[in-house]
Image (tube, helix red, strand yellow):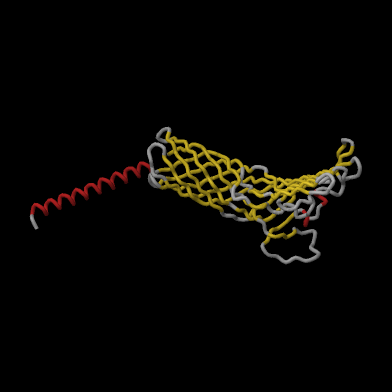
């Protein structure tokens, strides 16, 4: 081989190696500069998504409501307008504090801590000439969201994608029931029933994701905005009626109806256990919680979050 050609090849190869080393050094340096802990703090609002039928919220059959329906009966009782109710309990406001760590300028990991304050949602209603019943449900709870953050690492407006899990750790579902019966206690005496039940969940696992942008204000301080979705179904564990009153109103005077208050309900009508499979008998004991079929609460939603990001 020609010596000069060989020498030229050596020089070119050496140049490639040098450029590769410089590129690697630059990438490592930029990654090192991008490494570190940060904290995101913000909040937002989620709308309902992945709508489904609502669960049966009246195992005692006190309201007359057919599960997940809105029914209005005409004044003469000849016709009924029926509307199917579908939705989720995932609509509401969310507040979060999320510590995170960037391994380099392109990838990071987060552990979101979120408080969710769900909207009151109509899950059942019945209006007839003699009865007006409604069921309202909402969720209040705390969840954690471990996630991976991916970004191209731009220095100005920096887009990102976040994907992770959603794990409820505290909170419950509240169901508020109202039943009004005009003249239900005889002519001129109106009967009103008010109840509230708390449903506790079993361990549940959902998914969350977001697409957003980070806008730097200073070296350590940025603002962010994102569109987020969450897919979550919460399986019910136990339920208990925590408040129950029946009142009678005559000529503007209201009194409690004896024998129809919370303390008068047997345990089987106050406490419930949800199971996938169970054996029951015709005469169940009234001094023990009643077992009923499992139910799942749809808490899916999609919405927007905004907030600040502080680097350390």
Q: Nearer the viewer, residue 138 or 240?
A: 138
Q: Nearer the viewer, residue 88 or 248?
A: 88
Residue 95, percent from left and from top: 56, 40
Residue 132, percent from left and from top: 79, 45
Query: Going 72% across and 66% down the picture, which residue do you hit?
Result: 279
Specify whether residue 303 is in view: yes
Query: Going 77% across and 45% down the picture, which residue do you hit?
Result: 178
Residue 60 to residue 185: above or below: below
Residue 53, percent from left and from top: 66, 52
Position of residue 215 in the picture relative to residue 51 (left or right): left
Position of residue 56 in the picture relative to residue 218 (left or right): right
Q: Quadrant of the C terminus?
A: top left
Q: Quadrant of the N terminus?
A: bottom left
Residue 119, percent from left and from top: 65, 42
Q: Which residue is most to the top?
A: 217
Position of residue 205 in the picture relative to residue 224 (left or right): right
Specify whether residue 246 is in view: no
Query: Going 56% across and 54% down the picture, which residue do you hit?
Result: 205
């Amino acid at each position: 081989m020609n010596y000069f050609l060989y020498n030229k090849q050596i020089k070119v190869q050496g140049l490639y190696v040098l450029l590769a080393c410089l590129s690697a050094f630059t990438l490592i340096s930029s990654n090192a500069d991008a490494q570190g802990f940060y904290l995101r703090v913000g909040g937002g609002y989620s709308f309902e998504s992945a709508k489904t039928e609502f669960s049966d919220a009246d195992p005692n059959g006190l309201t007359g409501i057919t599960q997940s329906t809105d029914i209005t009966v005409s004044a003469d009782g000849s016709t009924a307008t029926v509307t199917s109710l579908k939705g989720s309990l995932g609509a509401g406001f969310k507040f979060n504090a999320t510590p995170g760590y960037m391994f380099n300028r392109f990838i990071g990991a987060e552990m979101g801590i979120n408080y969710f304050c769900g909207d009151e949602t109509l899950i059942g209603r019945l209006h007839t000439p003699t009865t007006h019943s409604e069921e309202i449900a909402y969720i209040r709870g705390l969840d954690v969201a471990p996630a991976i953050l991916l970004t191209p690492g731009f220095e100005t407006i920096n887009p990102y994608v976040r994907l992770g899990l959603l794990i409820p750790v505290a909170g419950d579902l509240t169901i508020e029931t109202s039943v009004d019966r005009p003249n239900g206690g005889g002519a001129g005496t109106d009967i009103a029933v008010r109840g509230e039940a708390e449903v506790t969940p079993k361990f549940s696992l959902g998914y969350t994701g977001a697409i957003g942008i980070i806008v730097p204000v200073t070296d350590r301080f940025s603002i962010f905005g994102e569109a987020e979705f969450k897919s979550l179904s919460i399986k019910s564990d136990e339920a208990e009626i925590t408040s129950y009153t029946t009142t009678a109103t005559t000529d503007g005077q209201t009194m409690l109806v004896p024998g129809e208050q919370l303390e008068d309900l047997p345990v089987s009508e106050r406490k419930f256990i949800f199971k996938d499979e169970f054996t029951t008998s015709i005469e169940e004991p009234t001094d023990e919680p009643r077992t009923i079929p499992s139910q799942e609460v749809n808490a899916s939603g999609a919405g927007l979050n905004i907030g600040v990001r502080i680097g350390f």
